[in-house]
Image (tube, helix red, strand yellow):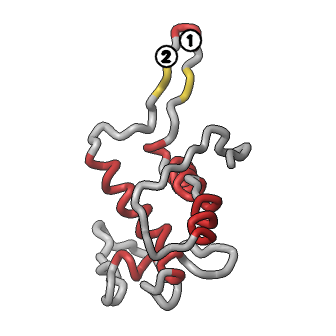
Amino acid sequence: MPTAQEPGREVRWITENAEMDLDDKARLYLAASVAQVDNVFQLTRRFLSALERPIDTASGRWQQVWYGYAPYNPDMVRKYLDVFRAVNNFIHTGVDGATPAMRLGFASKPLDYADLLWPGEKIPVPKRTRRKGRALKL
């Protein structure tokens, strides 16, 4: 059934499963939605300014938009999305306190950012450098 969030929703059964009974098929039809995908797209646009929707310019009558935060190198988008996917799946928890990776059994606890940046290693401590210049005479 179409909803307010998905008014034009249509569902098509593509792969037949002979072992599935009619009640299970009906349950799958009723649960079919793109809401989770839409939520990930919304989170991606919210957290990554490079993927933000364009902004109308002050001279909007010319139908001009400003892509001010868009990256010049499209390869950066792939890198941004790789980092976002790892953070979303392994660090950010839901209302139940679990990450998507925990719900699927890939992780036993939420990870820290350090676990993603330096997996299995200690966090590197930057070397101390001496200040250059003349010593102060007191």
Residue count near mark 1 (Cα–Cα under 10 Å), binned few <14, some 14–19, many ≥20: few
Q: Residue beneath label 2, please?
A: 64
Disc 2 + disc 1, Cβ < 8 Å: yes
Q: Quadrant of the C terminus?
A: bottom left
Is there any visible trace of residue 47 in the rendered image? no
> What number is the disc on residue 115?
none
In the rendered image, the residue lying farthest to the right is 4
Residue count near mark 2 (Cα–Cα under 10 Å), binned few <14, some 14–19, many ≥20: few
Residue at screen point 55% across, 20% down = 57
Front residue (pair 113, 14): 14
Q: Where residue 36 sits: x, y (%)?
A: 57, 58
Q: Where residue 33 sits: x, y (%)?
A: 58, 55
Q: Residue beneath label 1, please?
A: 59
Q: Where residue 52 sits: x, y (%)?
A: 50, 41
Residue at screen point 69% across, 75% down = 95
Q: Amino acid at mark 2?
A: Gln
